[in-house]
């Protein structure tokens, strides 16, 4: 290639455009500073949300704060066994078991503390006796047989105790005790001490456990006690009232004119109250189990029928299932916009609203009866009114609706799909009324078992009190 051609090629290449991007250089500290600021701001917001939630939780239920203080008081009292030399020498170095006992068994309710405390005492005592007996038997044999007896006993007793934990009756009331039995037995039996040392170890362990349980019970019962029975009693009353509000608000929402689903927050919350009833089964069973361990307190006598509360709760959940289906119908109609003709809806609206109101009144009256622990004088009348409303609903469903159309269009028929929701709602309300009668029967059984004061007894007591007051007034006049 000639020199002239090379020069021309260089000129063409130099005439092409060249693109350059200039990236400004920033110090690393300036890049990291916004990230550090964002992380700091995020951590501050998280801490603020945590503090707000903690404050709200304490404000909603101040008993939780009191419970925290009670645990601190119990641990402070048991620490005296370490600070005081005579007490420390009396229980030995096993005083730590008392602290562990308080941390493990101190529960929010008195029933929970009694349940764990008594189970722990019985399990520790029985496990210690069994372990000492096995070691005594093993010590009478040869060295090889001793190891075999101890190992075989640990295997057999641990396996049998673990299997017993699966028995429903044992699991409901003594599961924690069986767990402590397995732990204590293996702790003592496999420790390798001689029989004399085991006796001393078992005595110290039982003494420290008894000290911890005694302090727990004294603090739990004497300082602002929270009774599991009272919690179950109040939970049943609240659920029954929420069920009544949910039923009444759901029926009113379905027949409300205008846009549905745009009610205020309180109405929406009331209509969803049935969910609390559906979700409270586990809580009811736990509280009923713990209440059986509690002594006589307040208005609740010895052998109070706590199990009957579970039957009342089951009957209430049967009603809640129907209300849930009723809400599903309302939501489905709102979403699909399949509205029935107005004259068909007005044909059953009054009867449905009446039946919903009467059913809610029965539930509220039953809740008031449980709250006051007195038989209601009006419950029979309210149930009769509810049944009358249900019969009226049946008669309305069996009669054709009035035609609210022009004569030319009178021969037209309404598609079945447009009235299916109305028929479903009316049928569900009738079913709810029947299930509310079941709730009333369960409450009546509870009143019979718990010896609720009848209306005649209350009137007789009021007359007797008035007569005594009148005699006192005459004596004072004299």
Image (spheres, grey):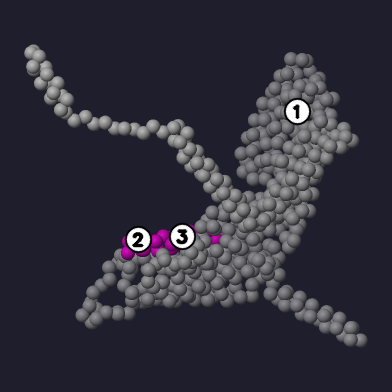
Looking at the image, do the residues carrying marks 2 and 1 touch, with CB atoms under 8 Å apart? no
Residue 422 higher or lower than 149, as above or below: below
Give the CA distance from mark 1 to mark 3.
Answer: 55 Å
| Residue positioned 73% across, 46% down in the render | 71
On the image, the x and y values in percent for residue 72 come to: 74, 45
| Residue positioned 10% across, 21% down in the render | 8
Tell me the quadrant of the picture where the N terminus can be found: top left
Q: Residues in magenta?
A: 316-337
- Disc number placed over residue 241 in the picture, else none: none
Q: Secondary structure at mark 3?
A: helix
Q: Which residue is mark 2?
A: 335
Precedes in sequence: disc 1 or disc 3: 1
Q: Which residue is mark 3?
A: 324
Comparing 268 with 6, the one in front is: 6
Give the CA distance from mark 2 to mark 1.
Answer: 66 Å
Label 3, residues with CA under 10 Å away: few <14, some 14-19, many ≥20: many
């Amino acid at each position: 290639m000639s020199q002239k051609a090379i020069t021309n090629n260089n000129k063409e290449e130099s005439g092409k455009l060249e693109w350059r991007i200039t990236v400004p250089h920033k110090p690393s500290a300036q890049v990291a500073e916004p990230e550090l600021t964002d992380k700091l701001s995020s951590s501050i917001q998280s801490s603020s949300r945590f503090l707000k939630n903690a404050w709200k939780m304490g404000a909603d239920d101040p008993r939780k704060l009191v419970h925290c203080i009670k645990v601190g008081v119990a641990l402070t009292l048991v620490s005296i066994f370490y600070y005081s030399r005579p007490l420390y020498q009396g229980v030995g170095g096993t005083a730590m078991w008392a602290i562990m006992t308080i941390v493990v068994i101190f529960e929010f309710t008195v029933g929970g503390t009694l349940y764990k405390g008594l189970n722990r005492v019985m399990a520790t005592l029985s496990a210690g006796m069994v372990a000492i007996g096995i070691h005594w038997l093993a010590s009478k044999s040869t060295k090889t047989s001793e190891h075999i007896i101890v190992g075989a006993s640990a295997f057999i007793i641990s396996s049998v105790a673990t299997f017993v934990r699966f028995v429903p009756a044992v699991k409901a009331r003594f599961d924690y005790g069986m767990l402590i039995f397995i732990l204590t037995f293996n702790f003592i039996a496999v420790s390798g001490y001689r029989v004399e040392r085991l006796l001393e170890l078992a005595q110290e362990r039982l003494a420290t456990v008894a000290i911890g349980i005694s302090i727990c019970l004294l603090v739990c019962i004497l300082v602002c006690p929270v009774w599991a029975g009272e919690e179950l009693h109040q939970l049943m009353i609240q659920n029954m009232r929420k069920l009544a509000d949910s039923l009444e608000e759901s029926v009113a929402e379905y027949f409300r004119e205008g846009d549905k689903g745009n009610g205020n927050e309180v109405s929406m919350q009331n209509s969803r109250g049935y969910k609390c009833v559906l979700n409270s089964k586990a809580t009811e069973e736990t509280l009923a189990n713990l209440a059986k361990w509690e002594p006589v307190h307040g208005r609740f006598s010895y052998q109070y029928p706590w199990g009957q509360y579970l039957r009342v709760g089951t009957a209430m959940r049967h009603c809640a299932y129907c209300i849930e289906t009723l809400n599903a119908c309302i939501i489905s109609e709102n979403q699909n916009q399949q509205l029935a003709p107005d004259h068909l809806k007005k044909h059953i609206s009054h009867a449905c609203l009446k039946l919903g109101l009467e059913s809610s009144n029965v539930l509220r009256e039953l809740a008031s009866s449980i709250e006051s622990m007195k038989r209601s004088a009006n419950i029979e009348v309210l149930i009769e009114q509810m049944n009358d409303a249900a019969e009226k609903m049946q008669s309305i469903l069996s009669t054709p609706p009035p035609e609210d159309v022009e004569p030319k269009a009178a021969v037209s028929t309404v598609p079945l799909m447009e009235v299916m929701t109305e028929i479903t709602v009316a049928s569900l309300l009738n079913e709810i009324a029947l299930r509310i009668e079941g709730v009333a029967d369960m409450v009546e059984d509870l009143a019979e078992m718990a010896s609720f004061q009848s209306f005649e007894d209350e009137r007789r007591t009021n007359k007797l009190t008035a007569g005594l007051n009148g005699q006192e007034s005459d004596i004072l006049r004299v």
